[in-house]
Image (cartoon, grey):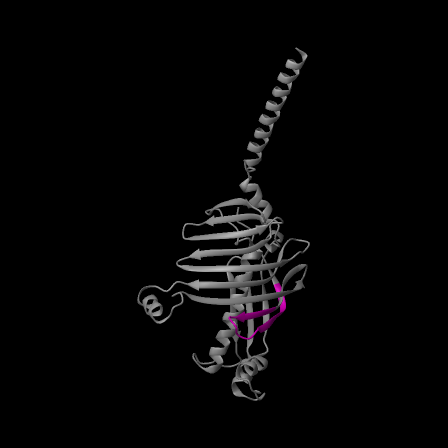
Amino acid sequence: MNQLGNKQCGKSLAIALMMGAVSLASSAQQPTKIDQKALLDQTRHAYYLPSDRGIQGFTCNVSFDWAGVLERASGRKIPAKTPTLVALKSASTTVTNDYAKGATVKATYPGEQPLAGSPVASRQKILNNLVKASLDGWDPFLSNRIFPLEATTYRFEPVPTGYRLTLDGGTFFSILDLDSRLKITHGESHLNGTTTEFTPEFDTSTHGWLLTSLKTVTTHAATGLAAETKAASSSSSPDDEDKASFIYSYQFVDDLLVPKRVIVQYGDGQETPYELTDCTLVKSTPAKP
């Protein structure tokens, strides 16, 4: 009897252990439910946000080495008294950057403004566009516009490296990959047939992740006759691809960090730096009650 009882007891114990193991395996397979709103709020506050400190943007003078840029572009020494160089160096170029609305660049020349299409006007336009593009790429990471707004459907999903955040705004679709510390490591956005992939890098600061570099690859899908012509004449994809990279170093204005030196490179072209000087902060306008 004792032997029979022991066998039955042992069998019951084995069944209990087996059922427990199955129960543990089943619970392990169930993903942990993510509080989407709480995680989004935590992610937002992991980044350097001037707006949280009552700052809407800044205004700076733009310092640009025209002689160096023109010499590297032409491969020859540019005399200091060259009329185009003299005119470009006489301009006062300023930028007003609004974290939510983007950058506005303006050049003021002593006397008359250069004629549209002239060498001076064309080069000034290139500088203005370069400054605007570098700050327009920087702003979303400092204003939280990189993350979902109220009308955007979003979802965090756990992945081995951290999280994948998908955003659907109706007219656009984006994917952001974040590491376990909620730092963006890669992203892509799709809008009107244009796909932009971007790879940011950040430094830690006392107030959160601060963007130090950004690489982008933008693909414009050709349509209609242009696409057919390109496809017929080339074995490659009919898409047009634009590459750009931006490197940011910083300065303190009051107690806030704003870019000091920005290096811009398009495709395989030369690196083009500019500096921001004599900066002042623009405070946020209080909301009307």
Q: Which segment is the magenta one? A: 262-280
In the displayed orientation, state which residue is furthest to the left.
Answer: 225
Q: Is residue 99 magenta?
A: no
Query: Where, by quadrant of the figure, is residue 228 drawn?
Result: bottom left
Residue 213 versus residue 273: which sits nearer the camera? Answer: 213
* One can see residue 83 in this view: yes
Where residue 37 sits in the image (x, y, percent)?
54, 42
Query: Where, by quadrant of the figure, is residue 259 drawn?
Result: bottom right
Q: Residue at x 57, y 29 (%)?
A: 22
Magenta span: chief secondary structure: strand
Name the quadrant of the N terminus: top right
Residue 155 versus residue 78: which sits nearer the camera? Answer: 155
* One can see residue 99 in this view: no
Q: Is residue 254 left or right of residue 43?
A: right
Q: Is residue 265 left or right of residue 251?
A: left
Where residue 112 sits in the image (x, y, percent)?
48, 81
Q: How many marks?
A: 0
Q: Is residue 73 left or right of residue 226?
A: right
Q: Is residue 275 magenta?
A: yes
Query: Where, by quadrant of the figure, is residue 15 drawn?
Result: top right
Q: Is residue 173 left or right of residue 139?
A: left
Residue 279 versus residue 30: which sits nearer the camera? Answer: 30
Where residue 235 sits in the image (x, y, percent)?
38, 68
Where residue 238 sits in the image (x, y, percent)?
38, 66
Q: Is residue 86 above or below residue 7?
A: below
